[in-house]
Image (spheres, rainbow, N blue to C red):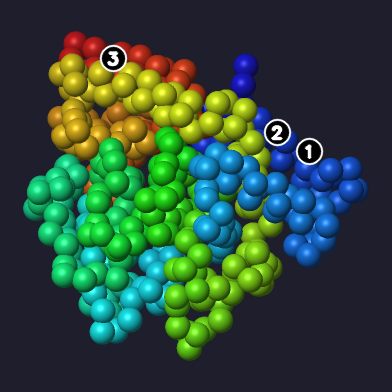
Amino acid sequence: MTDRIYNFSAGPAVLPESVLKQAQKDIWNLAGSGIGVLEHSHRGKVFEKVLDQAERDCRDLAMIPDNYKVLFLQGGASQQFAMIPMNLLPKDRTADYLVTGVWSEKAVKEAKVYGTVHEAASGKSCNFTRIPTAAETKYSAKPTYAHFTTNNTIYGSQWTTEPTPPAGVPLIADASSDIFSRPIDIKRYGLIYAGAQKNLGPSGVALVIIRNDLAEAGPKEIPTIFQYRTFVAERSLYNTPNTFGIYAMGLVFKWIKERGGLQAMAEQNQRKAKVLYDHLDQSKMFRCNIEPGSRSLMNVCFRGPDEEMENRFIAEATKRGFDGLKGHRSAGGMRASIYNAFPVEGVEALVAFMREFEKGAGS
């Protein structure tokens, strides 16, 4: 008998059980120091080792080149929506944004405060049910950077590969909901960032991987705390960081490495998603509206025949120990978020319940 249930929440989301159990111990006493991880100074030697190891493991997993910095920042991805144009978009320049959902729309809104925004592509006309093709993407003449959202948590779509901006234009990505779920070629990016609370750790910390030249490119007139160079110089310790969040991310990095790295994560995530999508494609009750070539491996969104039936399904699923299946308020329906730490057994159990529910509803 276990007191854990299946957590399909989109974020904060499921964490590896081994990470949670280790954290239980280290909250009381970290590394034999007699002090718990929540109590350690961010300037002390014990936490310094935690930070160093987290960065090393992060670099190893993604094979991050030496000319990129790894930063652990506060404010989540939403702060990055503003920090990026604040540092990289002069008022007389244009940035290109590829819009594939709510979060990229929010990024556009923040960028417009600082300079001109050109929407190089948009999935709005099809209600974000697919990722725009290369032929549908029209970049501006000389963008200062191109920004896209790798996975769309609300709608359940995902880029299978990076878009290709004009030569010499830095590619910037919000990878909050699928970072480290598959191999990544960091060299293709100028900057990539992610809120930790889906695949990397708890809420309250964001991972930023930024090329050295971009870290130093921002104007020095903006507030010190919003300059990337500030955190590069201070190794993420300009002000008191989310020490527990960084510690937990370090444990997750180790967990991924122990399971074979990013390629192993990709294979596992493909297997999990296939179980659920295969059922949706043959179901007489449930359906996925996202086109097959754009379907997310992280957030499987689906609908029932009507809202009343969806509410019945969600209520009964919750009673059975399947939590967090209600879709985002702006999209409705259901959403099963199956990030790296979500077990395949949970997906199989959900599909078994869906079959049972469908059979009962049709009898």
Quick one: 236 or 10, which is closer to the camera?
236
Tell me if 90 is positioned left or right of 25 in this view.
left
Q: Dot 1 corresponds to which residue?
A: 25
Marks 2,1: beta carbons within 8 A: yes
> Where is residue 89 shown, x and y percent of the image?
33, 76
Q: Dot 3 corresponds to which residue?
A: 355
Q: Dot 2 corresponds to which residue?
A: 21
Q: Sequence-wise, which precedes: disc 3 or disc 2?
A: 2
> Where is residue 60 shown, x and y percent of the image?
58, 41
Identify the residue at horizontal 86%, vertical 51% (top origin). Answer: 35
What's under tag 2, amino acid-wise? Lys
Q: Sequence-wise, which precedes: disc 3 or disc 1?
A: 1
The answer to whether residue 331 is visible is: yes
Q: In which quarter of the view is residue 218 placed?
A: bottom left
Q: Residues within 10 Å of mark 2 (few under 14, many from 20)?
A: few
> Where is residue 72 shown, x and y percent of the image?
58, 59
